[in-house]
Amino acid sequence: MSPVTAANHYDAVILGSGQGGNPLSKALAQAGWRTAMIERKFVGGTCVNTGCTPTKTMVGSARVAYMSSRAEYFGIHAQVTGVSMARILERKNEIVMQGRNNNEKALLSTKNLDLIYGVARFTGPKSISIKKNNGEELNITADKIFIDTGARPTMPSIDGFDQVQSLPNILDNASIMELDHLPEHLLVLGGGYIGLEFGQMFRRFGSRVTIVQAGAELLSHEDTDIVDEVTKILREDGIDILLNAKTQRIRGDKNKITLEIQLGNDRQTVEGTHLLVAIGRTPNTDELNLPAAGIATDDKGFLRVNSSLETNVPGVYGIGDVKGGPAFTHISYDDFRILRDNLLQGKHHTTEGRMLPYTVFIDPQLGRIGITEKEAREQGIKIRVAKMPMTFVARAREFGETRGLMKILVDPDSKQILGAAILGMEGGEMAAMVQLAMMGKIPYPVLQEGIFSHPTLSESLNVIFGHFED
């Protein structure tokens, strides 16, 4: 094993090439810091390789299949005879490789930045051992270390799962996007945004889909009225949804998977050809040998960081999914901005009070910003709730996209917007419009009286504030 020398010492080392670590490594290197990026497999992190980029590319294909099936409604004579999973995967892989290659080229062309492919382990608070992918071993030290190793799918502790886990029809969010054939009947274990996106996607491709959710509702963090509408939409699309369904045992072979489920006092079995496990995410910290550096984690293995993203070890930071909290690319990127501004510009930015928008890319999309009604009630915050169905939006009617609803919470005294859920056509973009108003502290009557181009989705902001529930 190579000794640590001055040549092996860096100003900064980033573990993991995610959407926070990548721009941070370039910013530090461009500022003159000698920087190393350690990546075990592919640059770009979850987003580029197994998350946002490939999933939304496939959602795009599913959207075309869905609209083709509705052609007659629009007066168009068309016939869809099936889907080509080979072409869907080819298109997805083309876009993934473009993003991955662009990320790698940007890192390799940055002065003062070394890109090292391998597996890293701490040997002390500021020292790391790397087993490079070419078999060599390298010891390095650094003044500052940034952990951006992300997370992976959580595997269930359900009786029988160990015996079937290695079967080719047991899938996670990455392996399901490598299927070159269409599942006859896809079982989805979990009713969060990953399970819903893939469930609707494969239903539109032509699979029978059953979602098995242990809780009483899908999307457990959302308000019940929003969840009820989501559930209704998915059932309209032909998806079977089992709620309060606790899976007791999993068994099967490469042709059939069987779930034994407890539904209240009843026990039943559900059979499918494939099973997608989508019950959560586990942080990639178990192989980092964090005890050697004295770095603290919570009981699930997520890094414990303060509002400045620093761990309990000074000079060691956490970025993105590995530290827990909202697992979204835009949050990882904001982590980068906080660290960049604090380390290079002497600022004192923190994660406290930052807005946490997200979009669930089912169709119609669910865009979310700010607090939910449930959270407001629990915290004793005074609110007024404006709500209306998408059938009230002219643009949605004209394009035949009237499923869903809009819901916005406001402060009755200050008239400021506190939160919104937009379940409807381009719900993510509409939620971003509401977010801009919140960022600018624009009171809702200004939006209500604003002049927006007709007919656009944005003019729904003229209408919704005429529909307060109280």
Image (spheres, rainbow, N blue to C red):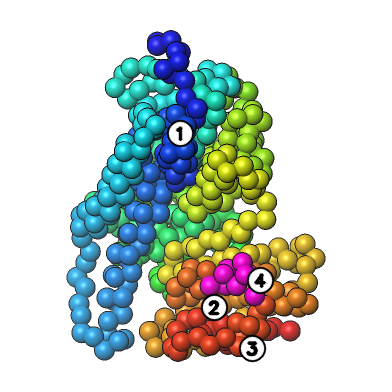
Q: Which mark is residue 32?
A: 1
Residue position for label 3: 466
State the separation of the CA atoms marked 2 and 3.
14 Å
Q: Which residues are magenta?
A: 433-442
Secondary structure beneath dot 2 equals strand
> Which image quarter: residue 144?
top right
Figure quadrant of the N terminus: top left
Q: Amino acid at mark 4?
A: Lys
Q: Amino acid at mark 2?
A: Leu
Q: Is residue 265 left or right of residue 179?
A: right
Q: Amino acid at mark 3?
A: Gly
Q: Is residue 177 left or right of residue 187?
A: left
Q: Which mark is residue 405?
A: 2
Q: Nearer the viewer, mark 2 or mark 3?
A: 3
Q: Amino acid at mark 1?
A: Gly
Disc 2 crowd, CA 10 A, few/some/many (<14, 14-19, 20+): many
Disc 4 crowd, CA 10 A, few/some/many (<14, 14-19, 20+): few
State the separation of the CA atoms marked 3 and 1.
55 Å
Is the residue 384 above or below the residue 122 in the image? below
Q: Is residue 134 left or right of residue 464?
A: left
Figure quadrant of the C terminus: bottom right
- Say whether disc 3 or disc 4 marks the residue closer to the N-terminus: 4
Disc 1 crowd, CA 10 A, few/some/many (<14, 14-19, 20+): few
Residue depicted at 70% across the width and 74% down the height: 416
Residue depicted at 31% across the width and 49% down the height: 99
- Say whether disc 4 or disc 2 marks the residue closer to the N-terminus: 2
